[in-house]
């Protein structure tokens, strides 16, 4: 789906959507539990749907109800289960070690883009602990064998999803295990989120100086029906849109005390000079003179595309650094962000692990490719606010990965979209 996007006098209120990061973790913990449970998920997406499908294939019985899912957990692991991850890296990287811990002989299928994303550090650890796996990149990707407890070593600066996947899986084994990090942990907030969610299911992870200690033979037991936080990473698109709005844009339903690291968007917007007002669970952002500020992307990689847009219309030069891991996202997000903004008229340069952007008063507009990346598509739409001409987005349907209602909410703040 290709669309043309323009905006007239943006402003208004948007309700934050469910955090898919939280939803993945709660759905998996519930499916591994010893009793049924309800998880409140008010907004779904193709990634969440993929996790539900895979858990059902493994033997859970998850049914959609009003505002959430009722989960009857896995009692008997299904033999030769077919797990369709679609394009969800979280689904694959979380459930691969879980499937190995369950001793399930399974087949993972996925879209071509996901199959090309490397999992080498996780793959090697699973192979070394008793599992037989297909060659990396294979589709279907086959798993067989029983994962063994022990000491797992992983880099902390490649993907936090490898660590979260093992944290979810290792308590299912008979004996305790440990994860030792061989480099500094980036995106640590996502690992903290995993530990916090597991704690809500009475599985206690111990943080150590070098990593984590994981109990063996642990029982996932929910402490009650679970309400899922709203998502800061997707809210960030509309919060940044507020920085371009004379009328202001408000996002409601956010947990101001959330452990989600993308909550940092508030501080970054304040630093650039935007007017930011926080009131209980709402954040309002309004246009003001914007100034460049250097940004460390190591803990907030998902914010980089929209922060690069913010920098593109801020006075001065911004350096977004520690961003090398963006090369391993749905697209090479360093290149796709640079390509998209340069096409729209931004002064932006890609370096091996950073983006350097010198701000302009306005961008031009033009035709951009989403690279089938939801965050590139959404950033391009928000960019139309500061463009002189329309923005045409190719493969705009990429937003369905995390935010199917994005263009509906975009219209509510004044966005005009036309399918072409």
Image: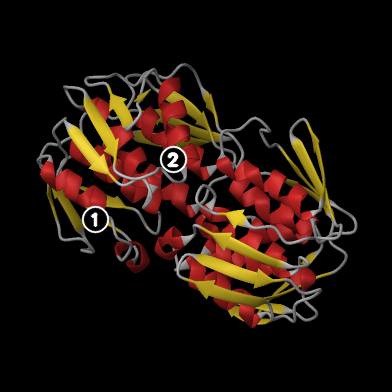
Give the residue drawn at x 54%, y 54%.
297
Direction from residue 337 to residue 220 in the image, left or right: left
Return the x and y of residue 183 as percentages of the image width and height.
34, 45
Quarter of the image holding residue 126?
Answer: top left
Choose the circle earlier in sequence order: 1 or 2: 2
Direction from residue 364 to residue 300 in the image, left or right: left
Instruction: Kindly identify which residue carries mark 1.
Output: 120
Q: Nearer the viewer, residue 350 or 92?
A: 350
Q: Can you say whether 56 is above or below 10 in the image?
A: above
Q: Nearer the viewer, residue 378 or 191?
A: 191
Return the x and y of residue 256 as percentages of the image width and height.
68, 33
Q: What distance separates the C-alpha of mark 1 from that of mark 2?
A: 22 Å
Instruction: Kindly identify which residue carries mark 2.
Output: 24
Which quadrant of the rendered structure holds the C terminus? bottom right
Q: Quick one: label 2, few (<14), some, or many (20+) residues within 10 Å? A: many
Q: Quick one: label 1, few (<14), some, or many (20+) residues within 10 Å? A: few
């Amino acid at each position: 789906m290709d669309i043309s996007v323009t905006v007239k006098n943006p402003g208004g209120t948007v309700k934050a959507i469910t955090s898919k990061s939280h939803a993945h973790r709660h759905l998996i913990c519930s499916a591994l539990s010893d009793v049924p449970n309800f998880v409140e998920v008010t907004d779904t997406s193709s990634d969440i749907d993929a996790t539900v499908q895979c858990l059902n294939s493994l033997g859970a019985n998850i049914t959609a109800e009003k505002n959430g899912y009722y989960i009857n957990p896995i009692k008997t692991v299904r033999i030769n289960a077919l797990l369709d991850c679609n394009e969800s890296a979280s689904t694959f990287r979380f459930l691969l070690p879980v499937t190995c811990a369950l001793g399930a002989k399974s087949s993972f299928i996925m879209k071509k883009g996901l199959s090309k994303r490397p999992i080498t550090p996780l793959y090697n650890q699973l192979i070394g602990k008793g599992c037989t796996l297909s060659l990396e990149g294979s589709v279907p990707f086959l798993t067989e064998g029983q994962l063994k407890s022990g000491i797992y070593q992983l880099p902390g600066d490649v993907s936090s999803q490898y660590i979260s996947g093992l944290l979810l899986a290792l308590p299912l084994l008979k004996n305790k295990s440990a994860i030792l990090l061989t480099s500094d942990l980036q995106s640590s907030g996502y690992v903290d989120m995993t530990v916090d969610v597991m704690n809500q299911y009475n599985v206690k992870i111990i943080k150590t100086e070098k990593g984590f200690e994981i109990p063996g033979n642990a029982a996932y037991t929910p402490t009650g029906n679970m309400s899922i936080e709203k998502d800061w990473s997707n809210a960030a698109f509309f919060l940044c849109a507020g920085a371009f709005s004379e009328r202001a844009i408000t996002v409601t339903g956010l947990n101001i005390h959330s452990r989600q690291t993308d909550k940092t968007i508030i501080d970054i917007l304040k630093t650039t000079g935007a007017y930011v007002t926080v009131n209980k669970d709402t954040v309002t952002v309004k246009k003001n003179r914007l100034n460049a500020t250097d940004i460390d992307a190591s803990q907030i990689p998902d914010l980089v595309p929209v922060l690069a847009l913010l920098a593109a219309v801020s006075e001065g030069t911004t350096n977004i650094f520690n961003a090398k891991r963006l090369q391993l996202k749905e697209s090479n997000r360093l290149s796709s962000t640079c390509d998209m903004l340069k096409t729209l008229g931004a002064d932006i340069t890609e370096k091996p692990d950073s983006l350097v952007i010198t701000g302009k008063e306005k961008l031009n507009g033009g035709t951009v490719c989403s690279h089938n990346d939801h965050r590139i598509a959404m950033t391009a739409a928000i960019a139309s606010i500061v463009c002189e001409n329309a923005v045409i987005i190719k493969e705009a349907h990429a937003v369905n990965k995390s935010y199917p209602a994005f263009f509906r909410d975009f219209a509510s703040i004044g966005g005009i979209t036309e399918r072409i």
